[in-house]
Amino acid sequence: AQSVSQHNHHVILSEAASLELGCNYSYGGTVNLFWYVQYPGQHLQLLLKYFSGDPLVKGIKGFEAEFIKSKFSFNLRKPSVQWSDTAEYFCAVLPIQGAQKLVFGQGTRLTINP
Amino acid sequence: EPEVTQTPSHQVTQMGQEVILRCVPISNHLYFYWYRQILGQKVEFLVSFYNNEISEKSEIFDDQFSVERPDGSNFTLKIRSTKLEDSAMYFCASTDNSNQPQHFGDGTRLSIL
């Protein structure tokens, strides 16, 4: 069965620190990969996506993610976080074939201290 | 930017009662989804809907659940006889292409008493 694993449940950083949130998935076929963000009291918003091509993808608000196929990983990074990045971050996988449903990781709560 | 809208934002219902959660997907989208998130747990897929029929459903989506697109704009999730364990945040999503990112609504918080 497909699964997505996010390594960190809760990450606490100070402003200007660098961020890396881990995401690994388990699926034998081709997938599209996504990171969604959920700010407090708001809906899930797309942060970035990977479909094909350059494995380093850039998203909104200075976020980027790198797809490493051999490691089944799609880690999210940001070189310098801000207080406004405080949110919950979800990695998600969408298989290209078969059931076309998003499979989410359990989420990582990010708290940025000013 | 067009948005997926969900109503109500919070629904409180007695156990055993029926509840209908409503969603208005983005107007030119063709694929519709319901997900739920129990407090502290993952966002879980419930059902996908395309061309006026269910295309995929999860094990969670048992006979107590149904979806409907009653008109050209609404997409509803009905739970016939709610249970305590149905308490969760329910998210509606839509997309114009099943391989493209899904756009999510704000969610409806369902509390079963």
Image (spheres, rainbow, N blue to C red):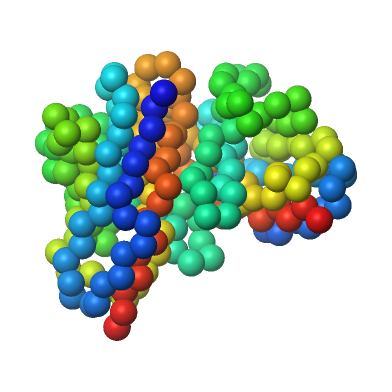
- Locate residue A70, reporting x and y percent: 14, 29
Give the farthest residue toward the top: A98
Which residue is depicted at the point 76% across and 37% down?
B78
Above or below: residue A85 compared with residue B54: below
Res B71 visible = no
Which residue is depicted at the point 18% across and 38% down?
A67
- The quarter of the picture where the C terminus of chain B appears is bottom right
- Locate residue B91, reporting x and y percent: 58, 46
Can you tell which quarter of the image residue A10 is in? bottom left
- Locate residue A94, reporting x and y percent: 38, 30
| Of the pair B45 and B21, the residue shown nearer to us | B45
| Of the pair B109 and B50, the residue shown nearer to us | B109
Number of marks present in the image shown: 0
- Locate residue A101, reporting x and y percent: 47, 29
Q: State left or right for residue B19 relative to residue B36.
A: right
Can you tell which quarter of the image residue A12 is in? bottom left
Can you tell which quarter of the image residue A93 is in? top left
Res A76 visible = yes
Which residue is depicted at the point 34% across and 22% down?
A96
Q: State left or right for residue A42 relative to residue B80.
A: left
Give the farthest residue toward the bottom: A114
| Of the pair B84 and A82, the residue shown nearer to us | B84
Which residue is depicted at the point 25% across and 54% down?
A21
Above or below: residue B64 compared with residue B108: above
